Amino acid sequence: MAVQGSIYEGAVVSTENQTKGKGQRGNTWLSAPGENLTFSIYLKPKFLKPTQQFELNRIVSLALFDVIKSIDNDMKAFIKWPNDLYVKNLKIAGILIENNINYQQISQSIIGIGLNVNQTEKLPSTATSLKVITEKTFALNEVLSSIISRIEHYYLMLRSNDVRVIHQLYEQQLYKKDKVSFFEDSKGKFNGIIRGTSTEGNLHIEDEAEYIRKYQFKEVRFL
């Protein structure tokens, strides 16, 4: 639809049964038909430069975080860099953003989101859902509407260049921030402490030698 020019900014494409869900690192996103949210949003953020691509990750992550916390404020939800949402230590949502760059601007962006809502069976051991956590069944359209509303809220903030507040909110909810954790990069495994992210979205980890290591997507993983 984007290639054909038959879609407008802000359009949402949703499906009850996603058969070829994509994730980072070539992974797949599996979802039980009719139980979760699997959808994409089409945006044209031409006000963003290519170096600002990660701002979209930030605002979508914050939107999902807000909706999860609005369901149960006691839920221990976190944003896991670069594009996952966790409750406690289990994944509840994933984000995959594909951008087109044209003349030093982001001409269009397709934001894919998967959120585990009502699924309770056949979840991976590393995943959870809103129903597992709350023992309640949710109306998918209502949750979807809430997510879209929050994304619009942060998108308008971003368009107004209010990035400082967005960065602060994102850093506050970052998974494992300021806590000793175990990682692996191209040089091997190490203990480190996440200290935050750069403007471009690189992850900053302080290692045992108190040196700040900086990582782009796919250059480091949590163990």
Image (spheres, helix red, strand yellow):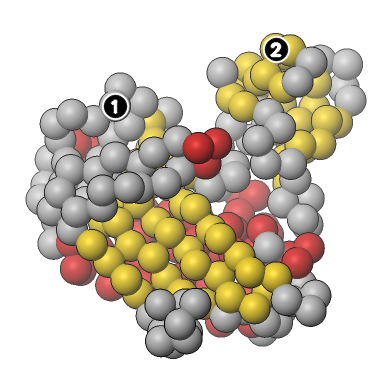
Could you tell me the amino acid type at mark 2? Lys
Residue 44 horizontal side relative to residue 105, left or right:
left
Query: Where's residue 31, x and y in %?
Result: 24, 43
Q: Which of the pair 138/46 is nearer the observer?
A: 46
Question: What SS does tag 2 mark?
Answer: strand
Spot occupied by residue 41 in the image (x, y as percentages of width and height): 42, 71
Q: Which mark is residue 189?
A: 2
Residue placed most toward the observer, 123 or 78: 123
Note whether 162 is above or below 187 in the view shown: below
Residue 91, horizontal then vertical, whole percent: 39, 36
User: Is any atom of residue 169 visible in this view?
Assistant: no
**Circle 1 Cα neighbour tier, 10 Å, few/some/many (<14 / 14–19 / ≥20):** few
Between 195 and 49, the one nearer to me in the picture? 49
Q: Is residue 139 visible?
A: yes
Q: Residue at x 15, y 35 (%)?
A: 120
In terms of depth relative to the viewer, which is nearer, 51 or 135?
Answer: 51
The Cα–Cα distance between marks 2 and 1, rounded to whole angstroms, is 24 Å
Could you say whether the residue bearing mark 1 is in a helix, strand or loop? loop
Determine which of the numbered discs, if any, sits on residue 107 in the image: none
Query: Which numbered disc flags the more N-terminal residue, 2 or 1?
Result: 1
